[in-house]
Image (spheres, rainbow, N blue to C red):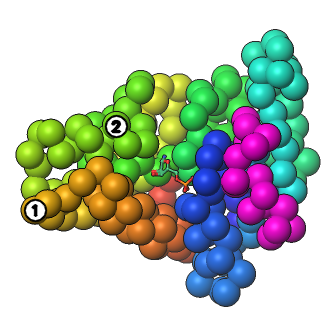
Amino acid sequence: MNIGFLASHQGSNMQSVVEACRDGGLAADPAVLICNNRQAKVVARAKQQGIPAYVLNAKTHADPDELDRAMLDALREQACDMIVLAGFMKKIGPRVLKAFAGRIVNIHPSLLPKYGGRGMYGRRVHEAVLSSGDAVTGVTIHLVNGEYDEGRILAQCEVPVLPGDTVDTLAARVLEREHSFLVETLVEIVTGRLRLRGD
Ligand code: GRF
């Protein structure tokens, strides 16, 4: 299973998956990173790990269809079998969506459908959880369609909200859980216990 990562920022989730691939915990290979932001830490991480990294965005491809095509070319060049969105801040184009239908997963730092959708990312998610007074938040891994944070939910796990939590403490607790949960869920997918399509 060759995994293509799409990410925009730190890439800590990509890193945890790459480590699981390298230490044998996950029977998959990190095949490529596509990032929209040249300065993002995830690009440096990919290079350090020897993973081909492509920076593709509206500057490299002004026409959205050309950008979509370039992303698909990169994924095919690196023989990707599935795509993991790990903090990717852009919508996926129709060509990539069609070519990888049912083989694109996203990780989101809340219990969707709570605190998802357009504009609900990063600290905003945890701010919303804290202002709601929820005692529990979590992590969702779901299939990707053309909309933000929609698509069939594949797996969820809970993370407690603790008294005195700030956005920073809650975000750190959820992110730490994301790292293990993403690997656990990919193991389920790669071993066929969790089916992405046809079910
Ligand atoms: C994670 O919280 C993920 O759930 C969300 O974006 C963040 C990415 O973090 N989609 P990182 O770049 O993997 O560190």
Is 76 inside the magenta-drawn segment? no
Pick whichever, 124 or 186, lies toward us.
Answer: 124
How dense is the environment of label 2, judged by Cα within 10 Å: few (below 14), some, or many (20 and up)? some
Picture quadrant where residue 104 is located: top right
Q: Which residue is mark 1?
A: 163
- Residue at coordinates 51% horizontally, 32% vertically from top-left? 145
Q: Which residue is mark 2?
A: 124
Q: Is residue 64 above or below residue 111?
A: above
Q: Is residue 1 above or below residue 138?
A: below
SS state under label 1: loop
- Which label number is shown at residue 114? none
Residue lying furthest top:
63
- Residue at coordinates 77% horizontally, 52% vertically from top-left? 43
Picture quadrant where residue 95 is located: top right
Mark yes or no: residue 83 visible: no
How dense is the environment of label 1, judged by Cα within 10 Å: few (below 14), some, or many (20 and up)? few
Q: Which residues are magenta?
A: 35-50
The CA distance from mark 2 to mark 1 is: 19 Å
**Mark 2 or 1 closer to N-term?**
2
Pick whichever, 9 or 5, lies toward us.
Answer: 9
Pick whichever, 27 or 48, lies toward us.
Answer: 48
Q: Amino acid at mark 1?
A: Pro
SS state under label 2: helix
Is 48 inside the magenta-drawn segment? yes
- Residue at coordinates 38% horizontally, 62% vertically from top-left? 172
Tell whether 97 sits left or right of 54.
left
Q: Amino acid at mark 2?
A: Arg
x, y (%) of residue 82? 67, 53
